[in-house]
Amino acid sequence: MNLSGHDQAALDIDPEETVEWREAFQALLDSWGPARGVFILQELHRMAREARLGWTPGGETAYVNTIAAEDEPDFPGDLDLEQRLAALMRWNAVAMVMRANAAYGELGGHIASYASAADLFEVGFNHFFRASGDDGAGRGDLVFFQPHSAPGVYARAFLEGRLEQADLAHYRQELRGPKEGARGLSSYPHPYLMPDFWQFPTGSMGIGPISSIYHARFMRYLTHRKLLDCGGRKVWGVFGDGEMDEPESMSALTLAAREGLDNLVWVVNCNLQRLDGPVRGNGQVIGELEKLFRGAGWNVIKVLWGSDWDGLFARDLGGALARALSQTVDGQMQTFAANDGRYNRENFFGQDEALARLVQGLTDAQIDQLRRGGHDLVKIHAAYAAAQRHRGQPTVILAHTKKGYGMGSAGQGRMTTHSHKKFDEHDLLAFRDRFGLPLDDEQVRRLDFYKPADDSPELRYLHARRRELGGYLPARRTDAAHVEIPDMRGYARFALESDGRAMSTTMAFVRMLGGLLKDQALGPRIVPIVADEARTFGMANLFKQVGIYSSVGQRYQPEDIGSMLSYREASDGQILEEGISEAGAISSWVAAATSYSVHGLAMLPFYIYYSMFGFQRVGDLIWAAADQRPRGFLIGATAGRSTLAGEGLQHQDGSSHLHAATIANCRAYDPAFACELAVIVDRGMREMMDEQQDVFYYITVMNENYAQPALAEGAAAAILRGGYRYAAYGDEHAEGGALRGVSGSTGSPAPRVTLLGSGAILPEVIKAAEALAQEGIASDVLSITSWSELAREGRSCIQASLHGAEAAGTPHITQLLEQCAGPIVAATDYVHAVPESIRAYVPQGRRYITLGTDGFGRSDTRAELRRHFGIDAQSIAEAARAGLRQPG
């Protein structure tokens, strides 16, 4: 029953009594201070709850700064030098984007976002963002940069001497730059493209925010498990207000509060604009975000108005200014930002006499220079310092800025400012004058980059500040120690020497994982991750073995405490149980998979999940993970469209291998047998932890039990390349090198086919081969462990040949097929496009028939599903016969 302003006025039936209540509360504050005031309010709130009034305190405070001017700490830096440095970075960022578009109009780039965020960055760079130091000890803070502000970060790196003028001249020219002796600069933060510079990709909106939360939580995980002391380190994220509309931005806010992540600080750049127009034209996004974050349990600091406004607020004894600001919607606030001092005098301060009197002594130019809080270094520093001191909660700083700040009539506050890439000469000269840049008119017209002399006060100050904070940022390091990998004959002997025992590949994986966790060197580095499906995958035995991570331990007695599979939470637990949040689980996986570069400590995450809820559900997060060069395993369980019987359309995966094939540093495998799985896991661990290659593995496993063969001698290398000749069928009927034909004649060439299968469908292929043998049709069965690896190698060979390489080589799949004969049938539990990916490498003259599971899944038994999609043994045999009838 919270009341609107109109309702409150109507219910004030005794204004005199209301005044008495206000005076009494003010007297209490004057006598006993804020703490007593908070206590009394909490008591009154408790009484209101008990009386069931249906009232709760509003989560939004007045539209003013959280930190009062008198409570601000002294600014510790040289304000004049910092403002001059920020002005230089603004100019070089503008010049960078404009020069690129003058040369090549289609390159794009953004000026307005950095114009609004420059001061937010600079206070961080000069006073708060800690680097790891030359020795990498401690690794420093983690900083997530608003992506469209990348030109400003490059401009700072230029002044620091980390980038050259030629590099800036090749912004968004990553291919041309190296050809011309320069470094091409990526459009946004991309570690894959600039692996020594950017740490975190943030270009896809919403991914930076959720990733920052799980990185902060993973730092606590490392500390609690006594693997690495992350105390004193912060995770800083500078994001946009429009970006907060992304579900990923909001989905983990309560986790951050629940975990008490006071090592996390978000700075939301509230310039009130997105690409097309206002974020909340008819409302106030800052107030909305304040309520949202407070409700989620965050500490909220608002930085709305610069120091120029302090005097106005001090003289506003009746509160007219605060009321007017609180009642101004963002669309109108944007209009004020886009216009000059005279317009604002008439249209904002001219609303009533009280406001007009406040600015009577100010010129129009002075009104135009009134800064929003996100452009005032002193205000920003006070907020950052408060956030750094705060304990027990994550902090969000809502910083009010102007998009295109300083761009004047060319772009400040304009609807089109996000895509603005050009200034005319008048606007450029006005920009120079606004920020007092040391450039003559001709330098401005030429868009010259500007860097002061190395011994100038500006550069001496800049380098001194970064030395004090441990070095330069952003910077990415990869000097993590190697981790010894155990021999697979220890943890996976059961799989290598199975000899016909029936089990599922999911169970084989879990058993291998349990063995690996016991290894003294590798075990502590393993991070098992699940999204509330551990029991489904048979992992419950790990609850007791290594425990489930909880920052507060286990404050309750679990219902199943006497069970062998009891649910055990512990502050040093190893399993990350993320609940029903695939986005959260993959974000945890990314934090662990990039620990080698972020923390200098190589970790090995295994995230096991329903394969349908991987690439299809959180594909953008996996793509961003690939950009960060992760090292770890994604385990797509209950994989394929027919193995998860009964679950139906939403749960049955037929496309994940298609998605995985598009990611260059992802090695995707679909092993049918536990022995194949063991070989792949062993190779992946060695590639990532010992050789330190920037790859990650996607492996699909199934929940179907069937006979598991032992590893064939010499098969391991071919398994890793993507396929091997598993067995031949029907040859036992041969006499003198020939098979009896279907008609029963002797000595004539026997009909022969080649059958390819992967994953859960390989047993169906084997059944088909056995049935065909009974008919006198011989076959070679190839186990395809990775369609994508075969296709990649095939493309590589073709490309080498096209470029005239003398030893281009023959694709592995081509070699395998050349050793076999007859028409080829390829069957998978995935869409046809998966086996179709190797068609180009099939030997000429051989018919190639693919069987797959296009369309939607169904709820039924495995047998019915496979018959429906045409991938069961009968369908495979039918396809083979058809191929023999029409071989070409």
Image: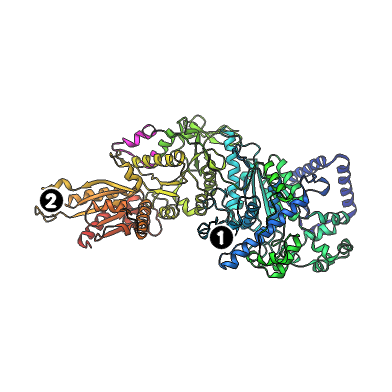
Query: Picture coordinates of residue 465 (x, y %)?
Result: 70, 45
Q: Quadrant of residue 714?
A: top left
Query: Picture coordinates of residue 883 (x, y %)?
Result: 23, 59
Q: Is residue 317 visible?
A: no
- Nearer to us in this view, 768 or 621: 621
Q: CA distance from mark 1 to mark 2?
A: 64 Å
In the image, which disc is placed on residue 331? none
Q: Is residue 444 visible?
A: yes
Report the span colored magenta.
488-508
Sequence-wise first label, 1 or 2:
1
Q: Quadrant of residue 28?
A: top right
Q: Quick check: 207 left or right of 24?
A: left
Amino acid type, residue under disc 2 in the picture: Ala
- Element type where label 1 sits in the image: loop
- Nearer to us in this view, 124 or 742: 124
In the image, which disc is placed on residue 172? 1
Crowd tier of the residue under label 1, counting other residues whose Cα lies within 10 Å: few below 14, some 14–19, many 20 or above = many
- Nearer to us in this view, 470 or 604: 470
496 drawn magenta: yes
- Element type where label 2 sits in the image: strand
Query: Picture coordinates of residue 763 (x, y %)?
Result: 30, 47
Crowd tier of the residue under label 2, counting other residues whose Cα lies within 10 Å: few below 14, some 14–19, many 20 or above = some
In the image, which disc is placed on residue 738? 2
Q: Quadrant of the C terminus?
A: bottom left
